[in-house]
Image (cartoon, helix red, strand yellow):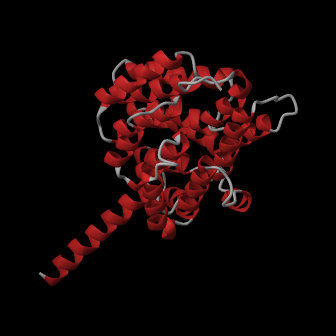
Amino acid sequence: AIPGGRMGDDLFSVKNEFYLGNYQGAINEAQSSDLVLSPGDEKERDIIVYRCYIEMGQSDVVQGEIGDGHPTALQAVKLLSTYKTNKAMAEMVLVTMKQWLEDAETCNNPTLHLVAGLVYMEEGDYEEAAKVLHAGTTLEMVSLQVQVYLKMARVDMAEKSASLMARMEDDATLTQLTTAWVNMHLGGDKISDAFYTFQELADKYSETPLLLNGMAACQMHQGKHEEAEKYLLKALTKNNSDPLTLQNLIVCAQHTRKAPEVVNRYLATLGKNAADSLLLKRKEKWESAFDAAAAATSHA
C-alpha cells in the first residue's frame, strides 16, 4: 500500500467494500484469486478481513485464528474482537491496550492506535480517543479522528481533519464519506451535499446499510422522517439486525407516530443484537429517572 494512508491499487476493492459497510463483499474481494499482493499488503488484507468478521458478529473466527505468535497489528484486532463480543472483559482489554501503547516495541503500531481509538470511542472516552489518534498516519485514523471530534461537538476540529484527508487522498471513498458526515453536522445547505454524496456512492457501488442510513440521517436532519423511513426499511432488508438502522427506525417511528408495538419490536431486536447501544442506555436512564420520580411522588 502507498504510505500516508493512500490506498494501494491492489487492495482498493477490499478496502472500499469495507468502508462502505459491505463486509461480506470485502471478504469475497480479499479471497479473489486475481489478487497478487506484497507481504505488506497481505498483512493489511488480513487485518481488514478479520475486522469484517468482527463487524458481521463472527468474532469466533478471529479468536480461533489469531494466536499469541501473530504480529502486534493482528493481536490488536483480536483485542478489538474480545471487547466487541464480551463487555465483561472491557477492563482487561483497556489495561492490555494501555500496556501495549506504552511498550516501546508496540507503541508505534498504527493498527493498535486505530483499535485503541475505536475502543475509547465506544467507551465514550473521547478525550483519550482523540489523544491516541492525534498523530494519525493513515486515512482511516484521520477519519476516526473526525468521528471523535463530531462526538465531542467540535465540528471545527472535524472540518480541519476532513481537510487533511482531502489533501491525503481527495477522491478516496473514505474521504468522501467522512466529508459527508461533517457536512451533515454543519447543517443548512451542507445537508443536501451530504445526501448527494451518499446517493452517488450508492449508485456507483451498492446500497449498503451504511449509505442508506446516511441518506436517512440527512432526511431526519431536515425533519423528513417518512422519507427517511423508506431508506431505513430498505437497509433493514439488507441486514435486519443492524443496530444503526434499528436505532434510526425507532427515532423515525416516534416522529411518524407508529403504533407502540412497532417501536417495541424494533427495541426488542436492538436489545438482542446491541444491548449496549446508546439509545438503549438512554432509555434505561430515562426509565430509572421516571421510576425514581414516581416513587418520590407516591411517598410525598
Question: Is residue 259 rendered to the left or right of residue 282?
Answer: right
* Residue placed furthest toward the left: 300
Q: Position of residue 85 (x, y in %)?
A: 58, 62
Q: Image quadrant of residue 132?
A: top left
Q: Is residue 10 left or right of residue 262?
A: right
Indicate the position of residue 39 as horizontal and vertical percent values.
74, 35
Whole-percent x, y for residue 146 in the image: 40, 33
User: Does residue 222 appear anywhere in the picture?
Assistant: no
Name the outermost residue toward the bottom. Answer: 299
Visible residue check, residue 119: yes
Residue at the extreme right of the image, as rendered: 33
Q: Say how many tags the image has.
A: 0
Quarter of the image that includes the C terminus: bottom left
Q: Position of residue 148 (x, y in %)?
A: 38, 40
Q: Nearer the viewer, residue 202 or 260?
A: 202
- Write down the quadrant of residue 2 in the picture: top right
Camera-side residue of 297 and 287: 287
Quarter the N terminus occupies: top right
**Which residue is at a point 47% across and 18% down the rendered structure image?**
166
Instruction: Work out which residue is located at the far front of the displayed protein and give it.
Output: 104
Q: Where 231 falls versus 66 (above or below)?
A: above
Q: Residue at x 43, y 63 (%)?
A: 95
Vertically, is 170 above or below 35?
Answer: above
